[in-house]
């Protein structure tokens, strides 16, 4: 019994001593702040002479009651100082004095300077969030020593240099965010070792070179954001292995080559955005297998060939944008099956033939943009039958015939462009029809074959 009590007493004594040491180490870091009188961590203080006081006084001196500090068994294990107006650096952070630290969140502060290599001493760290600060210079390679790390957020800083290949050693990592900085150089192939990775955010940097095919080994990946870089080369066909992927945003890079047909294997994909690259070749019919897809952006590339009829299988699709490519042939009537479609952008291609009547079935359509193609024949009769269409442009085609009477009830229309076609009809009647549109702020009827007396209109 005496031994048990003595053991318990020694444990309490050890915890108290550790608490004071950790408190003093944290206070040394606080003293380095450029605003040490910051009111948010005002609870960070020790009673007078705490280091020389009785053991009970040392327990009172525990940092475990301080703002943003949590402990386990009397030792600091969590530090959450998000949005605490801290202006300072990590140079005096007690990396070696907090052996049980598992969670660090310092987001939304004014921390600057480099991230010290001593960060690799936090061997128990599970969560590290330093985003939205002013950290500069390179990411230390020693960060690869944090073998237990599950979350690493360094985005929205002023970091530069390359991504350390040592990050590929963090086998427990599930969330990696290095976005919105000035990181450059290639993406390390070693990241393919992160088999537990679920979220990967590298967007808005200066990363260059090809996308490593090893990233196709990240079988648990759900979100992949690498847009706004200078990545080049093809999209790896190995991406077809990422069967849990829900978002793939690779837009605004310098990607070339074909869209791999293997992308059609990603049946969990909700959003596929590849716009503003130099991708060529045809649109793979296999994209019609992406039954969960709600957004498909391929505009601003060099895609050619026809629009696959299989895309009509994407019943959940809301946003389909293929503008500014080299697509040709006719628009498949199967697009009329996309009952949830709200945005259809096909302008600036080489599409031809009639605009399918089936597009009149798209009762949720808000924007129908088809200008600068080679469409011919009459406009579909049933466009805007649901009365929600806002933006309808078919300018600079070879359309003939009248403007459909079905548009008469389209009071939702805000912008309509019919210029540069061979449309005909009585212009006064058309203007009377469009005069009932309370939200219309742009109407282009120029360069057509309309006729009629406009003297009754004082303002056009």
Image (spheres, rainbow, N blue to C red):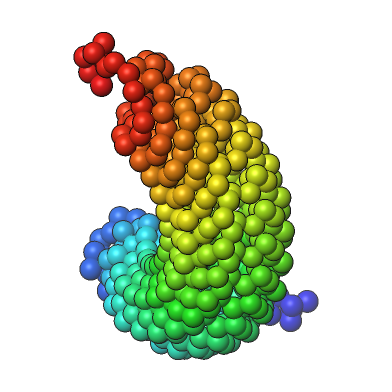
Q: Which image quadrant for residue 432? A: top left
Percent of width and height locating residue 224: 56, 67
Query: In this view of the protein, can residue 42 be seen by the observer?
Result: no
Q: Is residue 393 left or right of residue 378?
A: left
Q: How many marks?
A: 0
Tell me the residue at 41%/81% (across/down): 208
From the viewer's side, name the closer residue of 129 and 338: 338
Q: Residue furthest top?
A: 456
Tell me the residue at 65%/78% (across/down): 238
Tell me the residue at 36%/84% (across/down): 161
Q: Which image quadrant for residue 127? A: bottom right
Query: In this view of the protein, can residue 88 be seen by the observer?
Result: yes
Tell me the residue at 31%/59% (across/down): 85
Q: Residue furthest right?
A: 1
Image quadrant containing the N terminus? bottom right
Q: Is residue 295 above or below residue 108?
A: above
Q: Which image quadrant for residue 417? A: top left
From the viewer's side, name the closer residue of 384 and 293: 384
Image quadrant containing the C terminus? top left
Percent of width and height locating residue 379: 52, 34
From the viewer's side, name the closer residue of 296 and 247: 296
Percent of width and height locating residue 312: 68, 49
Percent of width and height locating residue 277: 44, 68
From the viewer's side, name the closer residue of 404 and 120: 404
Q: Is residue 58 above or below residue 377?
A: below
């Amino acid at each position: 019994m005496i031994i048990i009590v003595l053991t318990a007493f020694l444990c309490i004594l050890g915890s108290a001593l550790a608490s004071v040491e950790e408190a003093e180490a944290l206070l040394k870091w606080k003293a380095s702040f450029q605003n040490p009188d910051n009111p948010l961590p005002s609870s960070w203080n020790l009673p007078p002479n705490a280091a020389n006081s009785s053991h009970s006084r040392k327990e009172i001196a525990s940092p475990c009651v301080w703002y943003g500090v949590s402990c386990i068994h009397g030792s600091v294990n969590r530090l959450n100082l998000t949005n605490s107006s801290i202006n300072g650096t990590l140079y005096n952070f007690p990396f070696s004095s907090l052996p049980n630290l598992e969670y660090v969140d310092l987001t939304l502060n004014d921390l600057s300077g480099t991230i010290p290599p001593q960060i690799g001493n936090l061997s128990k760290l599970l969560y590290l969030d330093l985003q939205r600060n002013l950290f500069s210079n390179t990411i230390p390679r020693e960060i690869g020593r944090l073998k237990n790390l599950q979350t690493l957020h360094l985005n929205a800083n002023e970091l530069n240099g390359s991504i350390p290949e040592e990050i590929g050693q963090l086998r427990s990592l599930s969330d990696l965010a290095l976005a919105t900085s000035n990181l450059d150089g290639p993406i390390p192939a070693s990241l393919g070792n992160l088999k537990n990775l679920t979220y990967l955010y590298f967007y808005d940097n200066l990363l260059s070179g090809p996308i490593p095919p090893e990233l196709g080994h990240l079988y648990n990946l759900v979100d992949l954001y690498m847009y706004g870089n200078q990545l080049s080369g093809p999209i790896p066909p190995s991406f077809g292995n990422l069967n849990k992927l829900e978002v793939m945003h690779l837009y605004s890079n310098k990607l070339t080559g074909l869209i791999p047909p293997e992308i059609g294997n990603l049946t969990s994909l909700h959003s596929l955005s590849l716009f503003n690259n130099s991708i060529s070749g045809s649109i793979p019919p296999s994209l019609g297998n992406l039954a969960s897809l709600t957004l498909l952006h391929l505009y601003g590339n060099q895609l050619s060939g026809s629009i696959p009829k299989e895309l009509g299988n994407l019943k959940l699709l809301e946003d389909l944008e293929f503008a500014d490519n080299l697509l040709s042939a006719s628009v498949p009537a199967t697009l009329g099956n996309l009952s949830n479609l709200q945005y259809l952008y096909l302008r600036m291609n080489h599409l031809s033939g009639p605009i399918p009547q089936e597009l009149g079935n798209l009762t949720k359509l808000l924007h129908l943009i088809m200008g600068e193609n080679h469409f011919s024949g009459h406009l579909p009769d049933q466009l805007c039958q649901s009365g929600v269409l806002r933006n309808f442009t078919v300018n600079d085609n070879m359309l003939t015939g009248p403007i459909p009477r079905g548009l008469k009830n389209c009071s939702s229309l805000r912008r309509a462009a019919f210029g540069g076609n061979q449309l005909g009809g009585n212009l006064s009647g058309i203007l009377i029809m469009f005069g009932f549109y309370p939200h219309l702020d742009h109407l282009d009827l120029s360069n057509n074959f309309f006729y009629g007396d406009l003297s009754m209109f004082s303002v056009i």
